[in-house]
Amino acid sequence: MTQLTIREAISQALWEEMERDQRVIILGEEVGLWGGTYAVTRGFYDHFGPERVRDTPIAEGVIVGAANGAAMAGLRPVAELMTINFAFLAMDQIVNGAAKIHYMFGGQFKVPVVIRAVGGGGRQLGATHSQTPDAVFAHFPGLKVVAPGTPHDAKGLLKAAIRTDDPVLFIEHATLYQTKGEVPEGDFVEPIGVSKVQRQGSDVTIITYSKMLQLSLQAAEQLALEGVQAEIIDLRSLRPLDMGPALASVKRTNRAVVVEEGWRSFGVGAEVVSRLHEEAFDYLDAPVKRVAQDEVPLPYNRELEQLALPQIDDILAAVREVL
Amino acid sequence: MAQAELAVKTLDEQEMLRLFHEMVLVRRLEEEAARLYQQGKIGGFLHLYIGQEAVSAGVLSVRLPKDRVLTAYRDHGVAIGCGIEAKVVMAELLGKATGAAKGKGGSMHLADIRKNFWGGYAIVGGHLPLAVGMALADQYRGDDAVTICLFGDGATNIGYFHESMNLSMVWKLPLLWICENNKYGMGTSVERSSAVMEMKQKAEGYAMPNSSVNGMDVLAVRAAAQDALGTVRESGTPYFLEIVTYRYRGHSMGDPERYRDSEEIERWRKDDPITVYRSQLIADGHFNAAALAEQEARVEQDIQEAIEFAESSPDPAPSDLYSDIYTES
Ligand SMILES: Cc1ncc(C[n+]2csc(CCOP(=O)(O)OP(=O)(O)O)c2C)c(N)n1
Ligand SMILES: [Mg+2]
């Protein structure tokens, strides 16, 4: 084990996969000479060269579309979208392209593309640059959507994303890049579509992922001081969604809170709560609570922005309500 | 590599006859498809290529098997030109398990990976970026294949077109862009939707070599496509070929066609690619009318077989609903 930041973990995963497999290439805005807007690909251009680390024009449609096409033709492209907000300009290639092509042509073509996109709010970037629209993408069968919350998972899941023959949207949280954690030495893969118990507890189940995993872990520490043991389930993948560990946990704790950074309506929490109702209704001793973003475009003002984003206190309040 | 893969077929009489056969096959296949559509045996959208047959026949007669092909939803002619059997096309139109996409794609999504036909795509312009990526993959590996991407005049107005033209030039990709200018995108004429009347002018903005050709003349299309492909293969960089053509039928089935008058269609019918080519083959002394009629009779037989095959083929199984969403579960 070594201590890595999520940025280092993602960078290592990319680097190792590129060393391992000539078919892996990177394309996107500022991925090369600049070294990546979030410095994830720093040093890649010099080491792997311009053929494998390809700076593109500012043209999200063709960035993702070309990545899809290259994937169909046998490469393993990793397309970087500077932020997930720009994925809306590539929405058609993600939704009508990557997610459909395998099925629509009767299984003839594979699209082993990875689309890395940086999401999340909290940096005073204003309404268009601060979104957490993960649930939007999780809506589409055919696409895999992964959003790690720890360095360990970031590395293992990115490697899995690159190796799977299916298209994967890999969502990184802009404010998690500095988050540190233990990562095994050497090559390892974490399975896509498998949730993980990140903290054990017997009193309440917190179901979450990505940045909100980190907040939930902190909330759990506070709750422990009050004698409440929270079990934390990290979804890690939104599609395929593995409800197994969450259901097993809720059947023991009988109480649940779902924490997500995105908007509440039609969100990840809405889906998880429905599944809990469908499959564990009889085990619930209290209505499941959702912690989510206020339903507003995120404002620039720091206080207002923080007011809208889910905070540790919101998680604590929700847990206390279900206890 | 087999010799046949290295060279384009010479335009001998056998090839001339094959071109005739192919154009008639595409037309008759579509006339029958229209009939089956009216009978309710074909659902969804059905975009007929009738009038444009010289484009696919001419272009695809000069591609090498290693060259990838992509097109839009008006894809029956291109599918046949790529070598998909008429019966497999027909089976897909009827939604059968034996169809080109196992009944899951329909008319707009024919494909055959074995024929290097990478599909028909129903989002206008959406396949142009895919073509960029495929050409990139070939360039990256050092394969000297050319990716041939066909699209309509209407598609030149969408952002994808411009993003793809630009990037293909920036990355100097082996791409042959083919614009089938049939004068309309649904009911909106080029005059009413494009700032320039010649689609090839749009290539100029990207410093891309370009030309245009009469799409009603199969041999002219063939020659132009051969030159264009040769240019791409030699230079490894993109080329834009505009092929001026016309569709006689509505945009898709059930188009009330309020946007044009029948005189316009009649004027274009005088240049009908099959009629013109038939006369030309006879006038030039290559074939007599009887020999061509014999080809047409053969087509009738192929079409009847295709329909029988399609109609007698099984539907996909209910369990196929869930197959091929992912490559692995
Ligand atoms: C992005 C998108 N917008 C609109 C449509 C609806 N539509 C289907 S075909 C078409 C016209 C396209 O015209 P053109 O590119 O000239 O091709 P043609 O039909 O003439 O072969 C339109 C508007 C679509 N399929 N995709
Ligand atoms: Mg058109």
Image (cartoon, coloured by chain):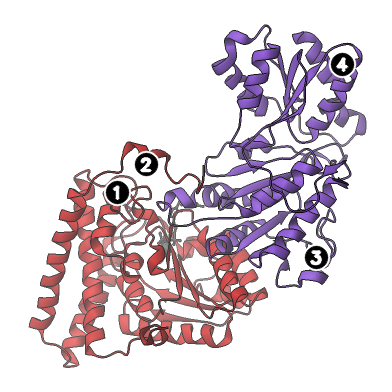
Mark 3 and mark 4: span between their CA atoms?
Answer: 43 Å
Q: Residues within 10 Å of mark 1 (few under 14, many from 20)?
A: many
Instruction: Write down the residue under mark 4.
Output: A223
Residue A62 against residue B299 in the figure, above or below = above
Question: To which chain does the residue with label 2 belong?
Answer: B
Dots 1 and 4 on the same chain: no
Disc nearest the viewer among 1 and 4: 4
Instruction: Write down the residue under mark 3.
Output: A44
Mark 1 and mark 2: span between their CA atoms?
Answer: 9 Å
Instruction: Write down the residue under mark 1.
Output: B97
Residue A15 against residue B206 in the figure, above or below = above
Mark 4 and mark 2: span between their CA atoms?
Answer: 49 Å
The amino acid type found where label 4 is placed reads Leu
Query: Which chain: purple?
Result: A
Res B164 quadrant in image: bottom right
Residue B320's tag is 2
Q: Position of residue A77 (x, y in %)?
A: 64, 60
- Of callouts 3 and 4, the N-terminal one: 3
Mark 1 and mark 3: span between their CA atoms?
Answer: 46 Å
Q: Secondary structure at mark 1?
A: loop
Q: Nearer the viewer, residue A114 or B271?
A: A114
Name the residue: 78% across, 53% down.
A186
Find out whether the residues at labels 1 and 2 contact each other: C-beta distance under 8 Å: yes
Mark 1 and mark 4: span between their CA atoms?
Answer: 57 Å
Find out whether the residues at labels 2 and 3 contact each other: C-beta distance under 8 Å: no
Q: Position of residue B132 (x, y in %)?
A: 57, 67
